[in-house]
Image (tube, grey):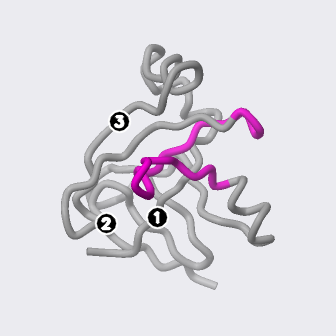
Amino acid sequence: MSENPYPVLVPPRLEKTLPWLKRFVAKHVTPIRVFVDTAHFKAPTEIYLGYCPVHKTFFLDYMHGYQGYLLCPLCLEEEAGEPYFSLDQEKCPVCGGYLAYFPGLNICLKCGYRHRLEP
């Protein structure tokens, strides 16, 4: 089990790779389940695609709290005053999954492999 990378932004260039119906439902109806993450949690956890109407961006997150709400990473960044995680199109050399960028560290969302960045 590795560190939890969620919530994470879906960059605009990757938005178009998401199925149209999932983007529509996430934007206009309700967050929609995209996959189950087993690498970052003790038990398999459902990851949802959400849409922030304030920042007009899609993001990935798991349901929080009893009522099941999602947190926008840009809203969290505004509240905390420091950058959160970002997702880019670069692929993991081990499994081919997408990488979440942290300060000085990249973590694969699929296999949990950690890639240290050289200073």
Determine if the magenta segment contains residue 26: no
Q: Amino acid at mark 2?
A: His
Name the quarter where the C terminus is drawn.
bottom right
The label on residue 80 is none
Disc number placed over residue 34 in the picture, else none: 3
Asked which secondary structure carries label 1, the reply is: loop
Question: Residue at label 1?
Answer: 5
Q: How many marks?
A: 3
Q: CA distance from mark 1 to mark 2?
A: 8 Å
- Indicate yes or no whether the magenta region holds residue 56: yes
Query: In the displayed structure, does residue 66 sit left or right of residue 112?
Result: right
**Amino acid of disc 1:** Pro
Q: Are marks 3 and 2 in contact (CB under 8 Å)?
A: no
**Majority secondary structure of the magenta segment?**
loop
**Seen from this angle, which residue lies furthest front?**
66
Identify the image quadrant of residue 3. Answer: bottom left
Q: In screen coordinates, is 98 left or right of 88?
A: left
Sequence-first tag of 1 and 2: 1
Along the viewing direction, whichever of 16 and 64 lies nearer the viewer: 64
Q: Quadrant of the N terminus?
A: bottom left
Q: Earlier in the sequence, mark 3 or mark 2?
A: 3
Q: Mark 3 and mark 2: span between their CA atoms?
A: 16 Å
Badge 2: residue crowd in 10 Å (few <14, some 14–19, many ≥20)? some
Residue 77 vs 36, above or below: the answer is: below
Residue at the spot x=30%, y=47% of the render?
Answer: 46
As rendered, which of 91 and 9 lies closer to the eye? 9
Crowding at dot 3, Cα within 10 Å, few <14 / some 14-19 / many 20+, comes out as some
Instruction: Report which residue position mark 2 lands on.
Output: 40
- What residue lies at 62% left-to-right and 76% top-to-bottom? 103
Distance from label 3 to label 1 (Cα)? 16 Å
Q: Position of residue 111 (x, y in %)?
A: 27, 61
